[in-house]
């Protein structure tokens, strides 16, 4: 019986490694060959969807770009600024400006949306992490992105604004 020489095994392993490195390179480069922006953490062919992202409130047709300004057509929008509490870092911090709207009904608020709600006389800005129905109707549970614990249930009547855009 003839044995395979070590050189053949080493060459075979080297070819396999080169192939795998090439394959990984193609998989890594693929998302960057398309015109849409993707985060570096994007891995093609995996389920990269999540309901933790905010709702898309601004239609691309409502964004007008001119040489000297950008106009975003949003009815009844207002601008907000944020206290440096750290609860929503790194998304919100001192110096960030938000574009916000008043929600029209419970269905206009989804998991992932950043909402402003009244609690003990203060306006709190946190992300909706759960939406459900109990004996009192629809409730929302929020949490600061940088907090370890979620907030108590809030109701639609507590929610004053939905943040639909951020300008840094």
Image: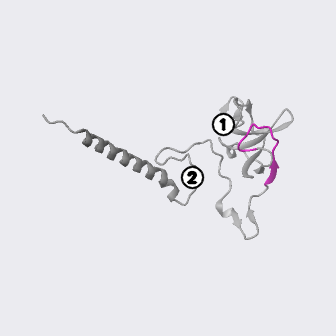
Q: Picture coordinates of residue 98 (x, y %)?
A: 77, 50
Left or right: 54 as drawn, with respect to 5: right
Extreme residue toward the right, this view: 121
Q: Is residue 71 above or below residue 11?
A: below
Task: Classify 10 Å Cα crowding around label 2: few (below 14), some (14-19), many (20 and above).
Answer: few
Indicate which label's residue lies in the foreground, 1 or 2: 2
* Quarter of the figure that contains the N terminus: top left
Q: Residue at x 51, y 54 (%)?
A: 31
Magenta-highlighted residues: 77-92
Q: Picture coordinates of residue 141 (x, y %)?
A: 70, 34
Residue 96 circle label: none
Extreme residue toward the left, this view: 1
Name the residue carrying label 2: 38
Image quadrant in which you'd find residue 41: top right
State the predominant SS element of the stretch in magenta.
loop
Name the residue carrying label 1: 129
| Most foreground residue, 77 or 133 | 77
Distance between the alpha carbons at the discs numbered 1 and 2: 23 Å
Q: Picture coordinates of residue 132 (x, y %)?
A: 65, 34
Q: Residue at x 85, y 37 (%)?
A: 122
Residues at discs 1 and 2 in contact (Cβ within 8 Å): no
| Most foreground residue, 47 or 27 | 27
User: In terms of secondary structure, where does tag 2 sit?
Assistant: loop
Q: Is residue 72 above or below residue 115?
A: below
Q: Picture coordinates of residue 64 (x, y %)?
A: 70, 66
Left or right: 86 as drawn, with respect to 51: right
Q: Is residue 87 magenta?
A: yes
User: In terms of secondary structure, where does tag 1 sit?
Assistant: strand
Question: Which of disc 2 and disc 1 is earlier in sequence?
Answer: 2
| Most foreground residue, 41 or 55 | 41
Image quadrant in which you'd find residue 115: top right
């Amino acid at each position: 019986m003839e044995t395979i020489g070590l050189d053949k095994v080493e060459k075979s392993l080297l070819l396999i490694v080169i192939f795998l490195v090439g394959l990984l390179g193609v998989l890594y480069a693929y998302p960057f060959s398309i015109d849409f922006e993707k985060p570096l953490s994007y891995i093609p062919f995996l389920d990269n969807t999540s309901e933790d992202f905010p709702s898309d409130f601004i239609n691309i047709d409502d964004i007008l770009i001119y040489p000297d300004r950008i106009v975003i057509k949003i009815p009844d929008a207002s601008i907000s600024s944020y206290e440096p509490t750290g609860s929503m870092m790194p998304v919100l911090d001192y110096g960030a400006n938000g574009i916000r709207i008043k929600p029209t009904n419970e269905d206009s608020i989804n998991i992932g949306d950043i909402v402003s709600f009244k609690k003990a006389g203060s306006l709190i800005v946190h992300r909706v992490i759960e939406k459900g129905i109990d004996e009192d109707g629809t409730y929302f549970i929020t949490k600061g992105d940088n907090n370890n614990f979620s907030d108590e249930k809030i109701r639609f009547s507590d929610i004053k604004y939905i943040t639909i855009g951020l300008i840094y």
